Amino acid sequence: MNGCDLDDWFPLEKQQQYVAQLIGKVGLTKCRAECFIRLWAYLLLQQQQEKTPKLKPPLTKLELPIGWVSCTHRQAAELFYSGKERGSDRAAGMMLDKLVALGLIQKQFDGNTTNIKIQYEPELFISRNRPTELIKLHVDTFNPRTDAIGVANLLARNYNWMNKNTSAAPQRIAKLLRHWAAQYPLGMRVLRRGDNLNPVGFYLLYPIATQSESNFFCPPSKSLHLSSATDIDPIQMAVPPDPNCQAIFIRSWVIDRPYLARSRILFLTDLQQVLSQMLEEFPNLCDLYTMIIHPSYEQLALALGFQKTSSDAQLSVYWVYLAVDRFLALNIKQTLTTGKF
């Protein structure tokens, strides 16, 4: 099967149903979503045809191919640009690199051909009988034994897209999360699905040692740690009880796209409650900082009252600040209900 035959095996109508579920994810334009779905269907069909040579069309739904499947840049170009003005093999390779950076696929070269593995995308596998709106969610304590890998994969997708590479390895992030949980677990919380208990959201409130406060007045790229290769953490954690600790860093904040709209208020309200508890151990907390790493977070930060402070010449990231007292005084539900998102 070549790229031109794909529409016979997996009709355009079916392709667009899957594309519609992807539109709106960070970094996914319609073109990238279409390329990803076509690539997925092609790899799945290649694998199924090897097992069942007499397989007949059409393919009715997407399933995860098992392991790695070969796909050259030329084959990818036929897939991506079939029926359009012909794209080059190089353009197809660049598109594959974009899909890698977005965390949708893995790619490796074995010396002869390119092999691709589809990454698991939860929202595409949710049964129509159990739409995301019906899945109960609750906020829970981060469990380093059971949550570290799931949360690390959530965070890696965001950081890899920001850096346009795959330097933010989930394995490294999981190790850091477990290290921080051993130091100060109170500020680490997950948004958990009620059916399988998997984390679909995470935040980290990180109390700042006095000697690290200067980082918030420097370019934010100097404080990136989850997405860097260095083992030296540029921001040190304060150890309770510390009367000199004045600043809190929202070091991570992520909610998987299918659950974002209906759980944002729940998650922020929980953050307020945890921050109030932290005041008992750090009584002089007064400054709240976070880093905006993607435009999708910008409107939320503005609605909550954060103000921009230091920006960065190297990356499109910047620090934002809000007084702890003003954040705790917010009526989150009223603020976000009247805001425009």
Image: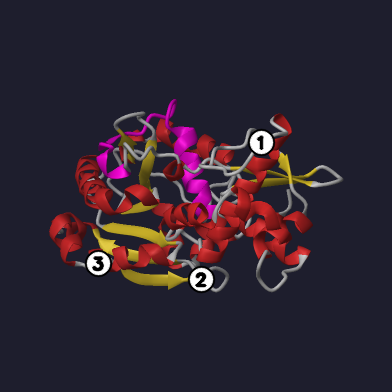
Magenta stretch bounds: 132-159
In the image, 162: left or right of 48?
A: left
Query: Does 92 lie within the magenta span?
Result: no
What's the amino acid at mark 2?
Answer: Asp
Residue at 53% x, 58% y: name it: 33
SS state under label 1: loop
Q: Position of residue 43 (x, y in %)?
A: 66, 44
The residue identified by callout 2 is: 312
In the image, which disc is placed on residue 99? none
Q: Are marks 2 and 1 in contact (CB under 8 Å)?
A: no
Residue 321 picture quarter: bottom left
Give the crowd class for mark 3: few <14, some 14-19, many >=20 residues within 10 Å.
some
Query: Does 141 lie within the magenta span?
Result: yes
In the image, 129: left or right of 212?
A: left
Mark 3 or mark 1, whichever is nearer to me = 1
The residue identified by callout 1 is: 55
Outermost residue toward the top in this view? 145
Q: Nearer the viewer, residue 57 or 206?
A: 57
Viewport quadrant of the C terminus: bottom left
Mark 2 or mark 3, whichever is nearer to me = 3
Give the crowd class for mark 2: few <14, some 14-19, many >=20 residues within 10 Å.
some
Q: Nearer the viewer, residue 131 or 223?
A: 131
The residue identified by callout 3 is: 303
In the image, 137: left or right of 122?
A: left
Q: Which circle's residue, 2 or 3, is located before the other in the chain? A: 3
- In space, the residues marked 3 and 1 are separated at their CA atoms by 54 Å
